[in-house]
């Protein structure tokens, strides 16, 4: 009977080692929505600074203020979408690294 339980223990040990070895290498460093808000806001700041003053810049700035308020009010998903829309308005692709 001891022989059967040794096999099970060996199998469980092998599976746990396999999961442990695969887990960390496969996992991406997940960022929070709050961090994503910060990253997109920074990207938008940079885009606004490098874009000539236009009506799009004024509208993007207004959207950024709204997005920052959403992020501060724990409505990060709305804030992220608003920041992405502001970036697109300026012709900039939002950094998907944050998702």
Image (cartoon, helix red, strand yellow):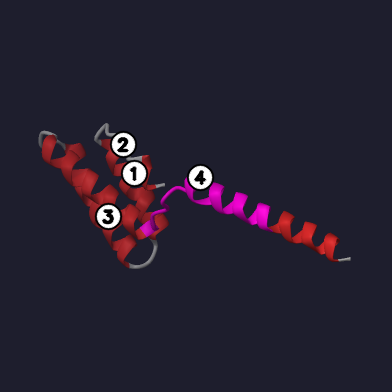
Labels 4 & 2 near each other (Cβ < 8 A): no
**Distance between the Cα atoms at labels 3 and 2?**
17 Å
Q: For mark 2, give the secondary structure.
A: helix
Q: Residue drawn 49% across and 51% down?
A: 24
Which residue is tagged 4?
26
Please determine whether, in this image, residue 81 is positioned above or below residue 2: above
Q: For mark 3, give the secondary structure.
A: helix
**Distance between the Cα atoms at labels 4 and 2?**
31 Å
**Distance between the Cα atoms at labels 1 and 4?**
27 Å
Crowding near the residue tagged with mark 3, few <14, some 14–19, many ≥20 C-alpha atoms within 10 Å: some
Q: Considering the image in quadrants, where does the N terminus appear?
A: bottom right
Q: Closer to the camera: disc 3 or disc 2?
A: 3
Residue 23 locus on image (x, y percent): 54, 51
Labels 2 & 1 near each other (Cβ < 8 A): yes
Q: Closer to the camera: disc 4 or disc 3?
A: 4
Q: For mark 4, give the secondary structure.
A: helix
**Distance between the Cα atoms at labels 2 and 1?**
6 Å
| Residue interval drawn in magenta | 13-33
Which residue is tagged 3?
38
Which residue is tagged 2?
88
Labels 4 & 3 near each other (Cβ < 8 A): no
Q: For mark 1, give the secondary structure.
A: helix
> Could you tell me how many numbered marks the image carries?
4
Main secondary structure found in the magenta portion: helix
Residue furthest top in the image: 91
Q: Residue drawn 67% across and 57% down?
A: 13
- The numbered dot on residue 84 is 1
Q: Earlier in the sequence, mark 4 or mark 3?
A: 4
């Amino acid at each position: 009977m001891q022989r059967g339980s040794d096999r099970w223990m060996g199998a469980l040990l092998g599976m746990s080692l396999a999961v442990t070895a695969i887990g960390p290498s496969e996992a991406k460093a997940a960022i929070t929505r709050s961090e994503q808000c910060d990253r997109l806001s920074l990207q938008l700041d940079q885009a606004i600074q490098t874009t000539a003053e236009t009506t799009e810049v004024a509208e993007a700035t207004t959207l950024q203020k709204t997005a920052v308020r959403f992020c501060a009010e724990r409505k990060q998903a709305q804030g992220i979408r608003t920041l992405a829309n502001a970036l697109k308005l300026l012709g900039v692709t939002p950094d998907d690294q944050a998702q």
